[in-house]
Amino acid sequence: MREQILSIVEKNSRIEVKELAIRLGADELLVANELKAMEDEGIICGYHTMIDWEKTSIEKVSAIIEVRITPQRGQGFDNLAERIYKYPEVNSVYLISGGYDLLVSLEGKSLKEISSFVSHKLSTLDGVLSTATHFILKKYKDHGTILNKSNEDTREIVTP
Amino acid sequence: MRNPLGSKIVSIKPSGIRKFFDIAAEMDDVISLGVGEPDFDTPWHIRDEGIYSLEKGKTFYTSNSGLTELRTEINNYLKRTQGISYDVKNEIVITVGGSEAIDIALRAMCDPGDEVIIPQPSYVSYEPCAILADAKPVILELKAENEFRLTAEELRSAITDKTKILILPFPNNPTGAIMERKDLEEIASIIIENDLFVISDEIYSELTYKDKHVSIASLPGMQERTILINGFSKAYAMTGWRLGYACGPEVIIKQMLKIHQFAIMCAPTTSQYAAVEAIKNGDDDVAMMRDSYNQRRRFLMEAFKEMGLECFEPFGAFYVFPCIKEFGMSSDEFAMRLLQEEKVAVVPGTAFGDSGEGFLRISYAYSIEKLKIAMEKISHFIEGLRNEKK
């Protein structure tokens, strides 16, 4: 039940509880309770909107930064990760396996703003060994959604 | 100039769907619920295998009966889903869609005068194919009160001493009806008793929303008298690849293969390679699509309930078959007015046989968003009709 609810709200957080219940063939109250419970348990942490900023006149630049850090005694990577994710311009911080430790993504108004964040804030943190910044040139697919996909139905209108 | 045509084909009516298509295709902004194929693209890993086979230069004919690997996988699939198995070499033929399999099965099995029982409403090709095979189609009208299942009494009353074949089209297009194990058991004994053969068109077998589909071939004594037809179109959203198959006793398949060999040579090679991938690694895709159809099915049932439109709950395929008898007009008239007044295209039940009169086929191979808009329009339309009557 939870898995089914999540798979739908993950794609459409605006769905009404009534419709959700109909589609799952479940009781409306039960679905509402499950949603509430998952919010309380922090399984559902937010309801966001996917925006293709490219199509607006608002200038935005995003980047992905690979960060190598020195883990701290007793804290591992957590302490430094926290120092990084507290910056509001940072979108996501992942600890990952492989050649570096943290994968940080962030959004800024301009190239300059992001460079300044990296050189003034990120690189100067104690424990940060190195950074490699990749600016995003184009988004093709994000959160499982293909951007710029035509929704045209190319099927014949009526078929047996 | 003399008449260039043969009288057999001239006597066959063109599909009733054509007229609708022509009108709808001329209009702008039509919301169609008239399509008999999935709205999903073929899953990428399946398309990828097709592309890969082309890159590798697999561009030649396969054997007449199809790739051994594909026939082996089909056999494995039937083992795991139905608990039946076939001789891969002699009892399975890969066809150009399920449609070809229907055609060649009838042509291989019929002599002039043999009667073929065709339950209707059902897919449009059984009757013409039976006529082209020189058989006599005997239409058996399924009833809404039985949820359009075929009952033992109905079957018994349609059988004569000329009856040779029963077409079994379940899960059903256009009604969405299914035949469960108990329903099949009841007719199986009659089939055996009367020494009939069955052409079981199971193209929608993966799309059931109650229990798993049961093939009549899996019942005791039935495999030896059943041609099981299935394909990749509906389960894996592969309609355009044109790939199906027929499984049955060697003595019948051998003759079917002769027609296939002379008329077709072999099913498209690229499609066959893609199909191997589909049947081996496509279970998750099928489950995802089935789940999505099921949600839409429930959504439509609720929408009909709210607008007070009578509809039995279908448990198969991706169609609902609501009853419009309360409005006192024919299915054709209703569908035409719905198209002209609300720009919603549905298919009149009569396109699938006279017994579809009073019903509409509504396909839910569309996104929920599209279905929502269409349901609002249909609701608006029938409210208007009800007010007219007052």
Image: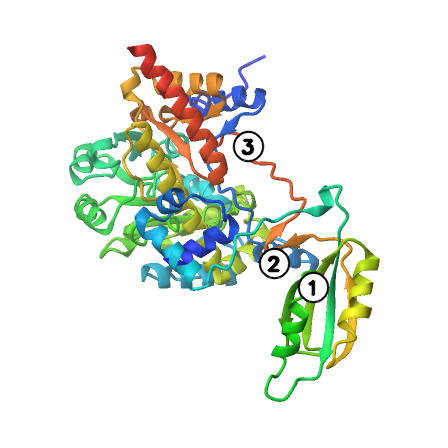
Query: Is residue B203 at all visible to an observer of this figure?
Result: no
Q: Nearer the viewer, mark 1 or mark 2?
A: 1
Image quadrant in which you'd find residue B111: top left
Element under disc 3: loop
Residue B374 lies, with reference to residue B183, above or below; the image says above
Residue A131 in the figure: left or right of residue B354: right
Image quarter where the C terminus of chain B lies is: top left
Chain letter, disc 3 residue: A
Label 3 sits on residue? A156
User: What label does residue B389 carry, if any?
Assistant: none
Identify the chain of the residue marked 1, using the numbered disc in the image: A
Q: Residue furthest right?
A: A112
Q: CA distance from mark 1 to mark 3?
A: 43 Å
Give the crowd class for mark 2: few <14, some 14-19, many >=20 residues within 10 Å: many
Q: CA distance from mark 1 to mark 2?
A: 34 Å
Q: Nearer the viewer, residue B84 or B191?
A: B84
Q: Is residue A83 left or right of residue A22?
A: right
Q: Do dots 2 and 3 share one subunit?
A: no
Q: Disc 2 marks which residue?
A: B49
Amino acid of disc 1:
Ser
The label number, if any, that marks residue A105 in the structure image: 1
Counting from the top left corner in percent of width and height, residue A4 is at 41, 55
On the rendered structure, is B203 left or right of B163? Answer: right
Of marks 2 and 3, the one in the foreground: 3
Q: Closer to the observer: label 1 or label 3? A: 1
Callout 1 and callout 2 share a chain: no
